[in-house]
Amino acid sequence: MIARVATAVVAVADQDVMLEFFVGKLGFTTVMDREMWPGARWVEVAPSDGSGPRTSVVLSAAKDFDREPDAAYPMTFDAADLAATVAELRAAGVEVSDVVTEPWGSYIRVTDPEVRQLLVNDRG
């Protein structure tokens, strides 16, 4: 049977800008950055916490598949300490909301360079 979600794909306008955002600002690691065919790349990143099997994010160039960049992320992310995450991201120059608390948990919104918002949860 299926064991886990392996990758989530996000169609982006600029793979280099988004790779720098995920690795340079969010602290992800590059899992793979290879040519798929001439002029097209498979760019895959994942959280760098090293904790077991993880889902990675493929930063797919929308133009390579004759589509527009995605307007939103098809997933949410988790962080153990949202207040610390907000402070770290703001120090790195990332636009991030204050922590919002709801009955189901807390979250922040992180704006990427292409103006999509990542939702980061702390359901603790």
Image (cartoon, grey):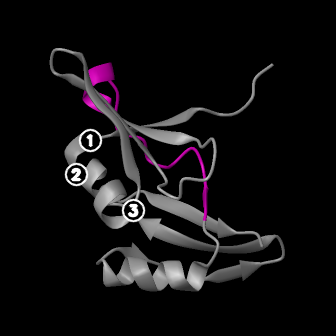
C-alpha gap between disc 3 and disc 2: 14 Å
- Residue 12, x across and y down, in percent: 33, 41
Q: Which residues are magenta?
A: 60-78
Secondary structure of the residue carrying tag 3 is loop
Count the labels in the image: 3
Q: Amino acid at mark 1?
A: Ala
Answer with mark 3 or mark 1, whichever residue precedes in sequence: 1
Q: Amino acid at mark 3?
A: Gly
Secondary structure of the residue carrying tag 2 is helix
Residue 98 visible in the snapshot: no
Name which quarter of the figure residue 43 lies in.
top left
Q: Which residue is mark 3?
A: 27
Which label belongs to residue 17? 2
- Residue 33, x across and y down, in percent: 28, 33
**Foreground residue among 87 and 60:** 87
Which label belongs to residue 13? 1
Residue at horizontal 84%, vertical 76%? Answer: 103
C-alpha gap between disc 2 and disc 1: 9 Å
Q: Which residue in the rendered view is the most extreme toward the top?
A: 37
Q: In the rendered view of the protein, which quadrant contains the C terminus? A: bottom right
